[in-house]
Image: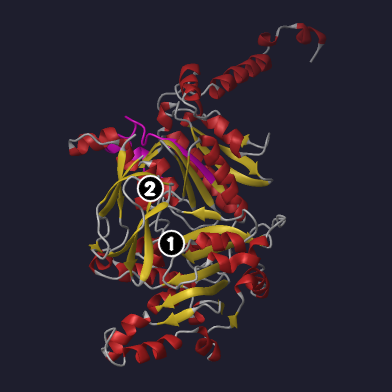
Amino acid sequence: MNQAQAELPPQATAAGRALQEYERRLAAALAMGGPDKLARRREAGLLNARERIARLCDPGSFIESGLFGDSALRPGTAPGDGKVTGFGRIEGREAAVAANDFTVMGASSSATNGRKIGHLKRVAAQRGLPLVFLGESSGARMPDHMGSRGMGTMLGNDGTQYQRLRETPWAAATLGYSYGSSSWYSVLSDFNVMRKGAILAVSSPLLASLAIRETVDPEALGGWRLHAETTGFADMVVDTDEEAIDAVRAFLGYLPGHCNEAPPVRAVPAGSGEGMRDILGLLPASRTQVYDMRRIVRAIVDRDSYFELKARFGKVATTGLARLDGRTVGIVGNNPMVKGGALDTDACEKITSFLVLCDSFNIPVVMLVDTPGFVIGTEAERKRAPGKIMNFMNALSLMTVPKLSVIVRKSYGQAYLNMGGGRNSDEVAAWPTAEVSFMDTQYGVRIVHGLEPGQPGYDEAYGRMNQDSEVWPMAGVFAVQSVIRPQDTRDYLIRMLEVHRMRPGNGTGSRLMRAWPTSY
Amino acid sequence: MGTYEVKAEVTGSVWKIVAAVGQEVEPGGTIVIVESMKMEIPVVAEDGGRVEAIRVEEGAPVAEGQVVAVMAG
């Protein structure tokens, strides 16, 4: 640059004008849907797409991809084309992030933002980055998708768009009205946290109302209660955007960055294992009384590390991620507090999806067993119980990550196998309180001996059969490998997980269920 | 302040009625205990409140989803 050029105002040179145009366009892209829409969100206590990314990623680490994306059909109308995508670090690890910007055309799916999402997914899969979807979108952009030309142009250009091979973890937060792509990605993900007030559905209440000619209540169509309690599509429910994004960070903290590495190891918090001394106090004295298995889980795992998933769905079982000696484990526990811990079809699906998650990302599984068996009866059969029980069993059989089973109290019938009995775990341990049989002794005496309570010989037959349910005969035939004191459970699990570490695969398993369904 | 129904989550028989009409119950407090599958399974008032009515009797059969009590809270 010579002296004369340097003294000219910037707009007088081609480069200067180009830079000014850059600044103008940058400001327009960052302005998103404009100050009014952003202000309304702020008043409602909602974060916007860029604030959500800032909350998710380590400070200053986000590098955007596609900032100048725009509507391909109506250029100049859609800052970022309604979806903000890029890469940022989460607790120091690279991740790919897509945040829907509802202030721009309702974050509707379009040609350009479809390419942005596709790029993000390809990079995540190829380079081994977890993928985060911050969902809030209205569905397909209109009128772009209308008619056969619209359909032919807009849809189906990527045959892998909704394919899931679990190369890397996917985590989703459903943070508003989520129809179309946001709901698809929420249910395709390994984790979906829902903020109260968000709606996850195939299409909007308006369209649903037009289609079925009745007014549809959004909460009934796809509110948090539906997905937490009935569909199981919400792994967690929170009150605010901030809590949802923090939950995504916490979830990913348990997982490896990709399928070819072991999960991260954390420092063990002080006080971990302190509850073990009194653990037997959490088990009621009478075998007919119930208790909350989650209290036993929390006593065993590293302090405050139990991250329960689908807590309001299939509550007869508890599933969640935790750490033992700083290492991630998956916990599957029967919960006698609900229906005595009898396994129903919702619990089968919840456990199956959890086993697939753990096996796909090299997370060992610990099963804590106290169940009288599967719920039986006409209602269970109508809910396709045999199919659900065998999906669960097949998943357990296909697992190549370590699986350890601890029989706390009851283990009966087919549920004995589903909860890792026999060779269905790498190791089975039992507390001395364990009782194992094909069915409850009272039913067994009736069916085997045809005796009712009070009839001659009933008490003797009951006594004999009941004694046979104790753990010792089973230990005698090596069908349990260890009988342990309850207070030693944490130490036993830590030690046995060391023994079973996946050395030949350098901490990784064979991932035989990487293409299993992502929801049921 | 409104009322809500407490429903049995499991089919069985009412083994014991724990709470009395008029009693204040903590959230998660037990209202009745149902015997099912040879287990004593508590039916709880998730949000607590005052017991307005008990709709079952000890020893009587109870079906999944049946209202066992009405709470004010």
Near mark 2 (Cα within 10 A), the count class, few <14, some 14-19 or many ≥20, is many
Residue at screen point 41% across, 74% down: A415
| A121 to A388, vertically: above or below | above
Residue matched to label 1: A337
Q: For marks 2 and 1, give the one nearer the viewer.
A: 1
Asked if the stretch drawn in magenta spans residue A152, the answer is: yes
Residue at screen point 38% across, 66% down: B40
Q: Looking at this view, is A270 or A506 the one in front?
A: A270
Say which quadrant the N terminus of chain A sits in: top right
Residue A38: give x, y in percent of width and height: 49, 22
Q: CA distance from mark 2 to mark 1?
A: 22 Å
Amino acid marked by disc 1: Met
Amino acid marked by disc 2: His
Q: Looking at this view, is A499 or A107 the one in front?
A: A499
Label disc, if present, on residue A293 of the rendered structure: none
Q: Is residue A339 visible to us here?
A: no
Say which quadrant the C terminus of chain A sits in: bottom left
Question: SS for tag 1?
Answer: loop
Colour scheme of the picture: secondary structure
Residue matched to label 2: A227
Residue B7: give x, y in percent of width and height: 30, 53
Q: Horizontally, is A314 left or right of A128 in the view?
A: left
Residue at screen point 51% across, 87% down: A474
Q: Looking at this view, is A262 or A20 the one in front?
A: A262
Q: Horizontally, is A476 left or right of A325 in the view?
A: left
Residue A308: give x, y in percent of width and height: 52, 54
Q: Which residues are magenta?
A: A132-158
Q: Horizontally, is A178 left or right of A167 in the view?
A: left
Q: Is residue A183 visible to us here?
A: yes
Sooner in the amino-acid sequence: mark 2 or mark 1: 2
- Location of residue A55 by image quarter: top right
Q: Horizontally, is A204 left or right of A306 in the view?
A: left
